[in-house]
Image (cartoon, rainbow, N blue to C red):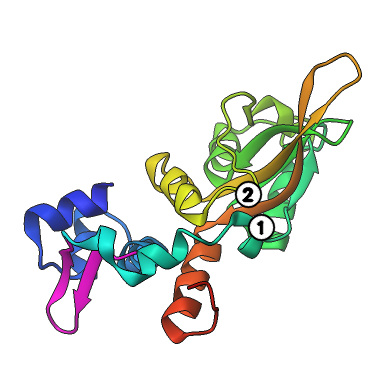
Amino acid sequence: MKIVQIVKERGPITGEQIADILNLTRATLRPDLAILTMSGILEARPRVGYYFNRRSANTLVSRAIAKIRVKDIKSLPVMIRESLSVYDAVVTMFTEDVGSLIVTNEDGYLAGIVSRKDLLKMAIAGGDLQKMPVGMIMTRMPNIITVTQEDTIHIAAQRLLNHQIDALPVVRTYIMPNGDERLEVIGRITKTNIARLFVELGEGGMDHT
């Protein structure tokens, strides 16, 4: 949303200029710019920059992605138990090369999510990372943004952008014998998933039209 507002007000504007305004690197913005450009919200011209496309709702890509479901591009979730230590969570995050970890309870249902920022804050605070469970610092249900595998990619992209997060757990609801609802994690959707999809659409590698 911030990128779109900047381009509306200052476009045409280069990716480097947008990154400078947001105090971020160009590489950090690349997935966001790919999403916005390939969805038709922004347009880009070589040696000119990005500008807002007021006809984006009518673009071919917009119509194509409206038909694509989360289940078509979701990836395997990277999950840990809430009893795992913060230290082991840090190791898992870097080993798996992900920006966030999905946390489950002892029964395997969604309990929370922990980001790089959460782990960094804990490391800076100087606590004993090997003794503190990740459940102490994670964002807990019901404050977690999720999608189902039948949601459209457009919905997933909107939630990623609106909530300024990098990944969404893909869930399905499980009804316990006592009637309580639990969320089973069956995948994840990230900015990278969506950016890769738009690249494939642009190259004609996927037939969703």
Residue 152 seen in render: yes
- Please tell me whether mark 2 sits on a helix, a strand or a loop: loop
Callout 2: 10 Å neighbours few (<14), some, many (20+)?
A: few
Q: As shown in the figure, which amino acid type bears the numbered disc 1?
A: Lys
141 sits left or right of 209 in the view:
right
**Residue 50 among those drawn in magenta:** yes
Q: Which mark is residue 183?
A: none
Look at the image and say whether residue 100 sits in the magenta stretch: no
Residue range in magenta is: 39-53
Residue drawn at the location 80% of the way across and 17% of the way down? 180
Residue lying at 50% horizontally and 63% vertically, measured from the top left? 194
Neighbor class of circle 1 (other Cα within 10 Å; few <14, some 14-19, many 20+) is: some
Q: Which element is circle 1 on?
A: helix
Measured as percent of width and height from the top left, residue 147 is found at 59, 43
Which badge, 1 or 2, comes first in the chain's sequence? 1
Position of 189 relative to 59 (above/below): above
Which residue in the protein does label 1 denote? Answer: 71
Which residue matches tag 2? 150
Q: Nearer the viewer, residue 17 or 170?
A: 170
The residue depicted at 64 percent of the width and 44 percent of the height is 148
Q: Tell me the quarter of the picture where residue 54 sits.
A: bottom left
Judging depth in this view, the residue of 91 and 40 nearest the camera is 40
The x and y percentages for residue 70 are: 60, 55
